């Protein structure tokens, strides 16, 4: 497998079948299948509008109608990781794990869903992260998926709900050899920044984007494209962000 596709912030609504999260997710999945046949799908948090078994299973079945490829999921601030893990054991469901090896690449899935100081923010258990780090191969290429951005970005209101202990995570990340990408969601928009040979890349929401020019309150940009990220795995790793017009 030489491709990983990242979808983020689906906010799947089960009951309202006219909800744009469903329609827009179908646009994204159809676009992915039009471009690629085999890929690993990563859902980087905020999977559902309501974190209950019914919503999670409805989302799983909805995506399974489009692909039989492997699907991995990490939690966001709207998710319930304990329930996700329970479903992964008891049902046919998304894969929930910390680390995946694909050839010379180590793929890390981090949980940032611990509640932060502000509603919507997150934290990471640094001891848990250090345990994962100890399993990484020294010379592998590495990608980390996490829901919350590890530093403050975007609108002023949004900066309050990034990763609370992101400074400590960033310090720990600097010790990792060949960390090519840290890919995150949460911001419902597209940001990219390179620091010390690592690309920090956000994934646009498959549902709707935030207007980060509005600094005082949450505002949606209904005209901005939805999309997904694609990571091409080889001796090195490259990416592209594919966007889809919803107008």
Image: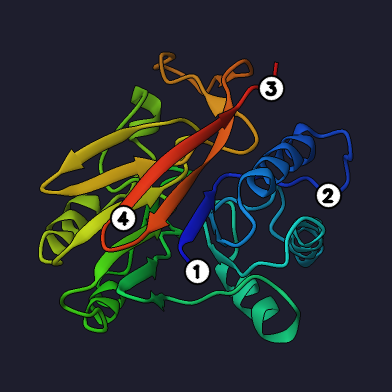
Classify mark 1: helix, strand or loop: loop
The answer to whether residue 117 of the structure is visible from this angle is: no
Please state which of the two labelled residues, at mark 3 or mark 4, is closer to the viewer: 4
In percent of width and height, residue 3 lies at 48, 58
The first of marks 3 and 1 along the sequence is: 1
Nearer the observer: mark 4 or 2; the answer is 4
Q: CA distance from mark 1 to mark 4?
A: 13 Å
Q: Secondary structure at mark 2?
A: loop
Query: What residue is pinned by disc 4?
Result: 237
User: Which dot, 3 or 1, sits closer to the camera?
Assistant: 1
How far across and how far down the image is residue 7, in percent?
56, 48
Q: Which tag, 3 or 4, sits closer to the chain's start?
A: 4
Look at 47% across and 48% down and name the residue there. Answer: 230
Residue linked to disc 1: 1
Marker disc for residue 246: 3
Q: Are marks 3 and 4 in contact (CB under 8 Å)?
A: no
Sequence-wise, the earlier of marks 1 and 4 is 1
Query: Is residue 14 at least partly visible in the picture?
Result: yes
Residue 174 point in image, percent of width and height = 11, 59
């Amino acid at each position: 497998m030489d491709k990983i596709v990242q979808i983020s912030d689906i906010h799947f609504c089960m009951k309202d079948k006219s909800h744009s999260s469903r329609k827009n997710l179908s646009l994204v999945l159809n676009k992915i299948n039009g471009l690629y046949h085999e890929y690993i799908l990563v859902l980087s948090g905020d999977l559902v509008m309501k974190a209950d078994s019914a919503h999670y299973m409805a989302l799983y079945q909805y995506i399974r109608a489009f692909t039989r490829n492997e699907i991995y999921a990490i939690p966001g601030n709207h998710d319930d990781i304990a329930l996700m893990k329970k479903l992964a054991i008891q049902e046919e469901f998304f894969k929930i794990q910390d680390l995946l090896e694909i050839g010379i690449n180590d793929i890390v899935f981090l949980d940032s869903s611990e509640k932060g100081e502000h509603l919507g923010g997150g934290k990471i258990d640094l001891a848990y992260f250090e345990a994962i780090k100890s399993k990484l191969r020294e010379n592998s290429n590495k990608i980390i998926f996490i829901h919350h951005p590890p530093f403050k970005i975007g609108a002023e209101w949004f900066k309050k709900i990034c990763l609370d202990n992101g400074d400590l995570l960033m310090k720990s990340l600097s010790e990792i050899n060949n960390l090519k990408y840290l890919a995150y969601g949460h911001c419902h928009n597209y940001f990219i920044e390179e620091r010390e040979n690592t690309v920090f890349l956000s994934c646009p929401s498959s549902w709707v984007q935030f207007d980060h020019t509005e600094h005082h309150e949450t505002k949606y940009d209904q005209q901005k494209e939805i999309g997904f990220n694609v990571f091409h795995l080889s001796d090195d790793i490259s990416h592209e962000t594919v966007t889809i017009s919803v107008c």
